[in-house]
Amino acid sequence: MFLRKLASRLSKPASGPPAVHLAAFGKHPGWNDHIDDLGLSTPELVATKRLIYVEGVAGNIDSGAWDALDAGARLEGFDHLFAWRLAGSQVLAGAMWSSSDGKGRKRYPMVVCAQLTGVGLAWALHEALPVLMRLRAECPQADTADRVRSLIDRSRAGLQAQVSAAEAQTETLDPAGLLRALAARPELGPDGLGLVRIMYQCERELPAYRTPKSGIVGRSSTFVVRPQHLRVPLGGDSPEQGLVTWHRFMLTQVDRMSPVLAIVPVGQSWVDLIVGEPTPAQFFCLRAAPKTMPLGSDIPYSLDPEFVARAVREIGA
């Protein structure tokens, strides 16, 4: 499992000054087929392309999984932001949108992805997402491959200047405060019931990734480590806030060494969370509407009183 090994290798804080890498891949009219790899200069970015694009997107296209969905059960096209948090102060932030190649084939998206080292998640997304969204607006207007390369190079240099001026950062987490704030959001339902359901889903579906804590299932060699998907409400007033909030939430639920990918479909009201190294099945969520994949906060689990009492204590409500 590449990401598990990678997280282990990066478990120590990253040395050196903050740094950034910026890559692009997928489809664009400047190329007659898939884009020549642009900026895939690190193992993390190579793995991102493989897992999200080569295996995830292509796997669901080749299998016909998205085509089999009715119109009301499927998102039409791609328009997503994502954040992947790895150990060692490594953050991957990306944008994906519907595109085509020079021959007019439109089934695959274009993806731009920034890897930032030595900065906190919130800072990384605050600085990187506007750059990625600007590329999302400019790249479709670029009519040649050279123009796209120029846009990527310019954006990389600008982001590097911002990152170089930043001080190395560490983030502190207030679990109880975070959970209370989430529980109070209207999209989590009355009395934070939606959050309790999501916490139950984490305990039930993620035993191999759980952080050992009093009264909660911990790691065990008997657990089979499979990637898992959860869908949650946006949990913020913007996609950026939603990505940061749910990454922080997952730090209260799973071991810090567990890779977590958060994906927001722009203009929609949910976040998809993938824990572990994804397979194509986990990326089915990219085009699946809530009619197909409901939010965990809406699933009417039978919650036993002991679990509810424990969750309420954690939330501090």
Image (cartoon, rainbow, N blue to C red):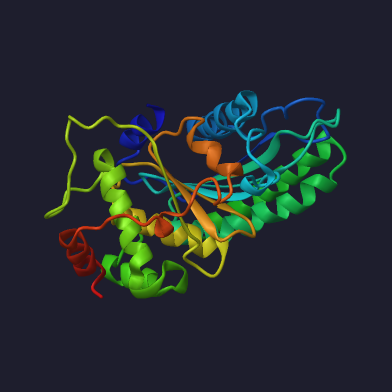
Choose between 81 and 207: the one closer to the eye: 207
Q: Where is residue 66 in the image (x, y as percent from the top left)?
A: 63, 35
Q: Where is residue 67 in the image (x, y as percent from the top left)?
A: 67, 33
> Can I make out residue 101 in this image?
yes
Choose between 58 and 139: the one closer to the eye: 58
How many badges with numbers are in the image?
0
* 186 relative to 25 in the view: left or right: left
User: Which quadrant: the C terminus?
Assistant: bottom left
Residue plotted at (50% across, 64% down):
241
Choose between 271 and 111: the one closer to the eye: 271
> Can I make out residue 120 in this image?
no
Residue plotted at (41% across, 59% down):
297
Determine which quarter of the picture holds residue 316: bottom left
* 156 relative to 242 in the view: left or right: right
* 8 relative to 268 in the view: left or right: left
Choose between 163 and 248: the one closer to the eye: 248
Determine which quarter of the picture holds residue 57: top right
Q: Is residue 302 above or below residue 151?
A: below
Q: Where is residue 161 in the image (x, y as percent from the top left)?
A: 60, 55
Q: Position of residue 288 (x, y in %)?
A: 58, 44
Q: Is residue 170 above or below residue 293?
A: below
Residue plotted at (32% across, 50% down):
201
Q: Is residue 66 above or below residue 251?
A: above
User: Which quadrant: the N terminus?
Assistant: top left
Residue plotted at (63% across, 38% down):
69
